Image: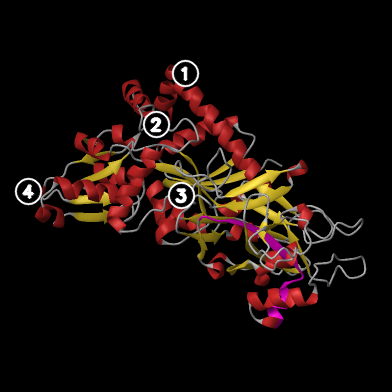
Amino acid sequence: MTPTLKISAFKDISAFLLSTLQPQLDINLEIKYVKNADEAHQDLFDNNADIVLMSYDDTLSLSLEDKYSAILALFPIHGGILDLCGEIDPEANKNRIGIDTNTGYARALRSYLSQKLTPEEYQNLDFIKAGATNLRYDELINNQIDATLLNPPYSYLEGAQADPGFQLFLGDYQGVVANTNKYVWQDLDKRALLKDFMVSYQAMLQNLETNSQSTIQSLSDYYSISTDIATNIYNRLWMPNGLNVNFQFNNLQLQGTESIFSQDTNVFVPLKRYWILNQDLNSFYLDPNATDAFNFQPNTDNLGSLVYDISSVSGEIKGEIDDGALSQTNALFHNLVGFYAVENTSGSILDVDDLNGNGLVDDLLNPGDKGYAQTALRQHVNNFFLEAGANGDPSKNTTASEFGEVVLAGGRFYAPFLIANGGDLLVKSGSFEQAIAAFLALNPGNTGASLENFQTKAVAYFSFGAANPDASEHLRRLENNTFGFEDLPSIAGVSDYDFNDTVFSFFYRT
């Protein structure tokens, strides 16, 4: 059976691209051309589409205004290939301006017109919600609206008289991007389809750009337009603000759209664009001026030690978790996960209890040293903890909203730990602090589980194999910023080594 990708898009140049791409794919594209951006948004919310093509401004709106943390911008489609078409003449009562919704391109249009017109002229404009690009073009040529923003092919068709000043005003601008839902991306089967689509899409663009004559003819045939008009459209597609021929977002274009968005909404755009997929890192962030927080030292089979390194950050950071990662948790046990302070990327901790008896409390214990576990847990971060597991019961998983924004001190290193079966201690004690104390009272030496008691015994595991009672690795890197703990002891016939007993993704904003 041929796999299917569902796509929601506007009936503009995207229609030509998708129809050209379909015969080149081993995937069936089920394409829905939406009537407006609200419908596109709803398709994303309701998982009615695997890919939604819409303006980057709408991506910002969903992520930052609607607080929809699951949106993920996969790759850019085109920059600001927009033209203000029609005629605006307040003295002649030509003041009916067609927009799709109040978000998206409407922000850029309002910004331009507020500068071009006098305050009185601008106040007299009538902004009419007229739907998607093709619908607004029809209303323009039927004299139902006087002006609107259009992109190819409609900005080159009869009746689409363009205002050259708008392009100069717009400058660097990110237009349409391909979006998905983070939960779709975290479905490995669906991700494989998305990647196949993306690779084929890029190859198609390169072929269209290289073979100009055949592309011009295809445009002419598809839109039933003259060769001259098709040639003009072709030339426009490959301008700097035209089609994006690779998957790398242009920072200047992103900033151009973000500037207009912030001016219109008074919403600050964080430096860490956690709604964007960075193709190099395979994570949800694009920040050319920063590096990822975690320091992962791999051993074999993608196992290794994990330390979150924010030693170069001054002040405080606000840490967050991702619901999509936590949703991958599937554990028999009810587990607790927390952070503790370490002194370096090797996992050394301060010997605050002077366990080595040298009279000092500022020297170091290393993973594997006697007393490491209890000393580490006593230095846990008070406000950072996650519940997960309990035989896949989602009600036992901490959500991103419950986790909130956890404040961590900069200039430090942090590492995660898991207490297998620790969730029952939390339920009984009522707080994370009390659960840690209850664990240390029950298992002060952090002795390992056995065949007889592994289903009930609470045991702490760390991201450093030497610190674990079975001296085995209990952490796997699943994705670039997603990690999974194994909560079963490394005993033959017991551990399933699936590393999905608590899956988490932690990121921060300065």
Label 3 secondary element: loop
Residue 273: which numbered mark, if any? 3
C-alpha distance separating marks 3 and 1: 35 Å
Q: Which residue is mark 4?
A: 91
139 over 225 or under it: above or below: below
Residue 479: percent from left, percent from top: 65, 47
Quadrant for the C terminus in the image: bottom left
For the residue marked with disc 4, what is the amino acid? Glu
Direction from residue 425 to residue 185 in the image, left or right:
left
Instruction: Please state which amino acid type lies under the numbered disc 3.
Output: Arg
* Residue closest to the eye, 477 or 473: 473
Please report whichever mark, 3 or 1, sits nearer to the chain's N-terminal start: 1
Q: Nearer the viewer, mark 3 or mark 1?
A: 3
Screen quadrant of the N terminus: top right
Residue numbers of the magenta segment: 411-428
Q: Residue at x 18, y 50 (%)?
A: 114
- Residue plotted at (40% across, 39% down): 251
Q: Residue furthest left?
A: 91
